[in-house]
Image (tube, grey):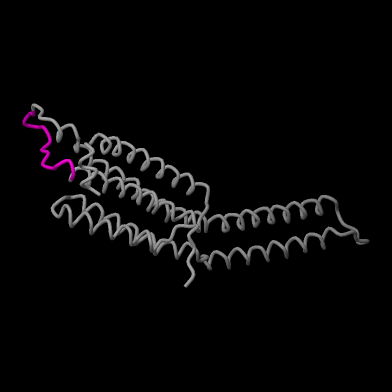
């Protein structure tokens, strides 16, 4: 079976999220980070199903749009027929009033057609925006999980207070933990980017770009911590 490597595949992204969840569970079985990854997997699974529905037209709206277009076309033809030159006597005021009413009806019908055409996009945009909001929220949750994972607390003995975070990770485990957080943020951005494959609505493109900028910025902070870890933990991680 031929495969393309020029675009994201929803199934492959979902499988990557599941694999990451297993890796976190095997390395940190009691950490809450595994639950966060499970939530991300649920969002990705829902997104995979939603992407299939985005590709399908909303037929009732399509039928209504076509019906209105036929009515508009019929009224336009009727208008042309009624205002054609005629030898019959008529009052100018009555004729002008008739033309105005017909044009007004055509304008209202045209607005109706435009609304129905846009309504399908609006409905699909709302479905996407709900998932985008969930991805934005989970990105901040991931950032909270790495917030107190400070390499300086692991590498140096510092005076602590009763409210100081408890650090029980070795440099190697801390690196793995931070790396998992970075991977999860990257996958969060990839799930959002899946929607651009079949739905290039400008508002959706802007929302996806916002998610990608957010996850990239948060991941950059994590990598600043990873770089601060000693080289021996890097070798051990390999």
Q: Position of residue 102 (x, y in %)?
A: 73, 56
Q: Is residue 197 magenta?
A: no
Q: Residue furthest bottom?
A: 1
The residue range painted magenta reads 160-172
Return the residue nearer the eye: 63 or 82.
Answer: 63
Return the residue nearer the eye: 50 or 74.
Answer: 50
Q: Please tell me how many numbered marks the rendered image carries.
A: 0
Vertical placement of residue 103 versus 163, above or below: below
Please tell me which residue is depicted at 23% across the width and 59% down the height of the picture.
22
Q: Which is the main secondary structure of the residues drawn in magenta?
A: loop
- Asked whether, in this view, residue 199 is left or right of residue 11, the answer is right
Please tell me which residue is depicted at 22% across the width and 36% down the height of the picture.
229
Return the residue nearer the eye: 39 or 229.
Answer: 229
Please tell me which residue is depicted at 69% across the width and 56% down the height of the picture.
106
Residue 108 position by quadrant: bottom right
Q: Position of residue 215 (x, y in %)?
A: 36, 43
- Asked whether, in this view, residue 203 is left or right of residue 156, the answer is right
Q: Residue furthest left?
A: 162
- Asked whether, in this view, residue 91 is left or right of residue 108, the answer is right
Vertical placement of residue 206 versus 45, above or below: above
Q: Is residue 170 magenta?
A: yes
Vertical placement of residue 163 versus 50, above or below: above
Please tell me which residue is depicted at 26% across the width and 39% down the height of the picture.
226
């Amino acid at each position: 079976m031929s495969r393309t490597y020029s675009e994201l595949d929803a199934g492959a992204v979902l499988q990557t999220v599941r694999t990451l969840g297993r890796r976190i569970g095997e390395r940190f079985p009691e950490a809450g980070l595994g639950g966060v990854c499970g939530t991300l997997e649920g969002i990705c699974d829902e997104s995979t199903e939603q992407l299939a529905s985005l590709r399908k037209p909303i037929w009732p709206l399509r039928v209504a749009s076509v019906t209105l277009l036929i009515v508009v076309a019929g009224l336009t033809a009727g208008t042309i027929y009624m205002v054609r030159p005629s030898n019959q006597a008529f009052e100018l005021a009555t004729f002008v009033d008739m033309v105005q009413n017909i044009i007004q009806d055509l304008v209202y019908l045209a607005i109706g057609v435009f609304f129905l055409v846009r309504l399908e996009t609006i409905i699909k945009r709302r479905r996407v925006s709900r998932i985008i909001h969930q991805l934005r929220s989970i990105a901040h949750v991931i950032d909270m999980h790495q917030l107190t994972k400070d390499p300086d607390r692991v590498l140096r003995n510092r005076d602590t207070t009763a409210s100081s975070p408890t650090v029980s990770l070795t440099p190697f485990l801390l690196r793995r933990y931070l790396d998992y957080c970075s991977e999860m943020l990257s996958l969060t951005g990839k799930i959002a980017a899946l929607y651009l494959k079949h739905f290039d609505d400008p508002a959706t493109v802007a929302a996806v770009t916002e998610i990608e900028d957010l996850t990239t910025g948060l991941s950059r902070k994590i990598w600043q911590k990873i770089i601060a870890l000693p080289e021996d933990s890097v070798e051990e991680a390999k």
